Image (cartoon, grey):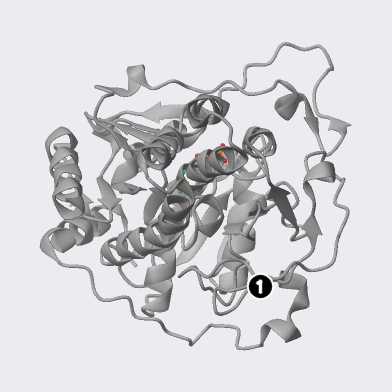
Amino acid sequence: MLAGAAHARAIGRAATRQPQRHRHSNAHADRRTRAERPELGIRTGGHAYHGPVCDAADRLEPGSATQRVPRPALRATAATDERLPATIGWDGKAVVLVDQRALPEALRFVRAGTVDELCSAISNLVVRGAPALGVVGAFGVALATIAGEDPHLAAQRLAATRPTAVNLAGGVRRALAATDPLAEALHMIDEDIDRNRRIGAFGAELLLDRARVMTHCNAGALACAGYGTALGIIRAAHESGRAPSVWVRETRPVLQGSRLTAWELAQLGIPATVVVDAAAGAIMAAGKVDCCIVGADRIAANGDVANKIGTYELAVLAHHHGIPFVVAAPVATVDLACAGGAAIPIEERSADEVRRWAGQPTAPADIPVSNPAFDVTPAALVTAIVTENGVARPPLARTIRALCAADRAHDH
Ligand code: MRU
């Protein structure tokens, strides 16, 4: 575990290393079988999940979790994880999503069998996180095709639901270009998990033993098809015995940190402490943070990073305290068509996300609210961007482009 300056050297030292092969340590894994842990609705072997299902009709109102009998036979993918459910699945007729509004209180699932239902699930944050949105965008085009709807119209509607995460429009485009959109969407699940494992392997090499990592929002398995990006790095470090621990910022207003990240880390047995967002500076000043790792919704060509509101503030604090600030994202999150952060569209969400919580008022009912869902961290505050193709370091405008080119060369 290192203080900021020494830790920055550790990051530098790992620059040219190749990622280690994923080493799965079962040291901390929960070895109980699924049958012994029915509360998790886990699918093992990647073939089925056994949790409660909330069907489309009653799916989108908070608290409407009509629980149905377990639904068998999700399509097999590489998304096997003994401890976390598959964020996104396909049951032969509908997309099956972990209902992220219900966690951590309940693990339940939502089925979306039409483009309308999927658009609602995206807008209402049943499913969220840039890589996950890319995959469900592709499934949306598949649903339109299966139903005989115009896939281009569906694509427009899907892409408009959440404008900041470039992965969503990218996933939609990929499915539109595919001869079999459903096969493409299914392939994207496996691909996403594979990429995240590579991000994890590269990123874990940056962390020294017992690193105390601060993160924001949820960039874990729930934000992806599986494994996670920022949390993927922490997972990989944990699995390789480096014993990281995590400061989890709660992430106002909808608490992706305290609800989702804290839940994931608890499932994985990784030590984590939840703090209110405003505590970050004091904890850094006390010398208790070695590194910040966050995800990204869109990375501009110059290395500016759009991510959950509050990320910029965290980066400024990290800079002030000399703490490395690392961004983890697949190259699909890089938008070379966006020259800089100013060109990234920032989603403005409902005022009631701020004025109310769990049905209770948290502000006067009519008070004006500004609720931007994301902010932009300038490239100058970013120590490194970890992708599945390697680690980009300043000057990010050059290095991130090179990693994207490596991806295109790999694909073709
Ligand atoms: O509004 P959300 O919950 O979709 O925002 C998600 C984030 O900001 C994540 O950090 C980002 O998408 C990266 S997820 C791997």
Given residues 85 and 357, the one toward you in this image is 85
Q: Residue 137: x, y in percent?
A: 50, 40
Please give the name of the residue rendered at 27% of the width and 46% of the height, measured from the top-left corner: 385
Residue closer to the observer: 126 or 200: 126
Q: Position of residue 215 (x, y in %)?
A: 48, 50
Q: Residue at x 57, y 44 (%)?
A: 146
Task: State the image coordinates of residue 22 (x, y, percent, origin top left).
Answer: 32, 75
Query: In which quadrant of the rendered image does the N terminus lie?
Result: bottom left
Dividing the picture into quadrants, the one containing residue 20 is: bottom left
Name above or below for residue 228 compared with residue 397: below
The residue positioned 77% from the left and 45% from the top of the image is 56
Q: Mark 1 = which residue?
A: 42
Q: Is residue 43 visible?
A: yes
In the picture provided, is 339 more to the left or to the right than 122? left
Q: Find residue 175 and report its horizontal and vertical position in percent.
A: 42, 42
Q: Crowdedness of circle 1 by 10 Å Cα count: few (<14), some, many (20+)? A: many
The correct choice, above or below, for 73 with respect to 313 in the image is: below
* Residue at x-position 86% and y-position 45%: 63
Question: Left or right: where does residue 324 sit relative to residue 16?
Answer: right
Q: Is residue 63 above or below residue 33?
A: above
Answer left or right for 324 relative to 389. right
Q: Nearer the viewer, residue 48 or 288?
A: 48
Going by the numbered disc 1, the residue's amino acid type is: Ile
User: Residue 291 falls in which quadrant of the image?
Assistant: bottom left
Q: Secondary structure at mark 1?
A: loop
